Amino acid sequence: MKIATKFIYRALAGLALTCFGLSPMAQAQLQLPSASGNLFVSINGLTNDNFQDQNFAGAIFQYTPTGTRNGALHGLSRPRGLAFDSVGKFFAATTFFTDTGIAQATILKFSRGRQSRFATLSDNFYAEGVAIDGADNIFVFAIDTTDPNLASTIFKFTPDGTQSTFGSVVGQGFGLAFDSAGNLFATDAGVAPGGVNPTIWKFTPDGTRSVFVGPSAFPPDQGPVGLAFDQFGNLFVSTEPNGIPPPDGGGLILKFTPDGTETTFAAVHDYARGLAFDSAGNLFVAEVGFIDNLGQRFPGDILKFAPNGTRTVFDSGIGNGNAGPEFLTFR
């Protein structure tokens, strides 16, 4: 099975009601904190035995710095990228599928205890990573579900919601991250059915695209997924192997210095997705979980790595079979 089929899931028939990305019955218990250090995590939600995830089955969890889950928002459709702007407004990417299989992506905004629809994308785009620059422009990575290579577009929204196309990649896009100079980095998983190459792309603030690292940076049949910069400008990247069930420990966390020098920071269980650093330099990793060929379901975890690489489990047993954590962000 290609990685593409792990990232994109068709909706189940009969789940309609709205394309807003949020169920009318959603339970909102997400309190945006005034203090810093809280971790926010998008949770994929319930999946069936055909690896399909369902509308309104996802959630966003909130954790204190000590690991206590102190809030949740349920009833979301495939929540993915999460980000805060400079004044504490919270943005989340969601994707609803109609009963005819059409993807409808929505960016939700949470501010002062209220939720609203910030933006919607054209039909058949599946929203993934979200990143916000120093001017509070919101960037959203979206996969074209009709393209054979799952080519992806980066859309830019100004704070007032004005939309433009910032850039694109040839394969399946997932994670976005800004460096301190305002350059945007984007992952191209590169193992879609068309066989494009795994790449991390670099976009300057004016949208000029170049290759930061190409296929030789990744093990065979693996592609980059999540991205996060540490305080020293090093780029950390999660990779995900191709195939279900995956070999235990097949995923990696790679570290790239600003000049592209590569080392392996850690080996992880498979299907590591989003990455985020806290203010103390600890790296958090979301593992979404999976369903093997025998139908056995493995839940997801959130891992924590100290700056020296020491690994602990921040939270475990989340979801049940590709239903666990996807993206992370701190507030």
Image (cartoon, rainbow, N blue to C red):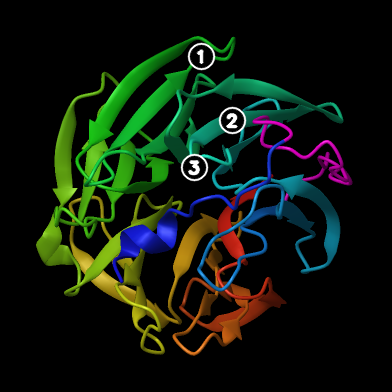
Q: Earlier in the sequence, mark 1 or mark 2?
A: 2
Q: Where residue 101 sits: x, y (%)?
A: 49, 42
Cα gap from disc 3 to disc 2, whole angstroms: 16 Å
Q: Where residue 35 sits: x, y (%)?
A: 81, 44
Magenta stretch contains residue 294: no
Q: Where residue 9 sits: x, y (%)?
A: 48, 55
Which of the 4 image quarters holds residue 136? top right
177 or 247, nearer to the observer: 247
Q: Which residue is mark 2?
A: 106
Q: Which residues are magenta?
A: 17-38
The answer to whether one can see residue 155 in this image is yes
Q: Which residue is mark 1?
A: 158
Locate residue 65 relative to residue 112 in the image: left or right.
left
The answer to whether one can see residue 182 in this image is no
3 vs 1, front mark: 3
3 vs 2, front mark: 3
Quadrant holding the C terminus: top right
Quadrant holding the N terminus: bottom left
Give me the residue at 40% from left, 86% from top.
249
Q: Which residue is mark 3?
A: 101
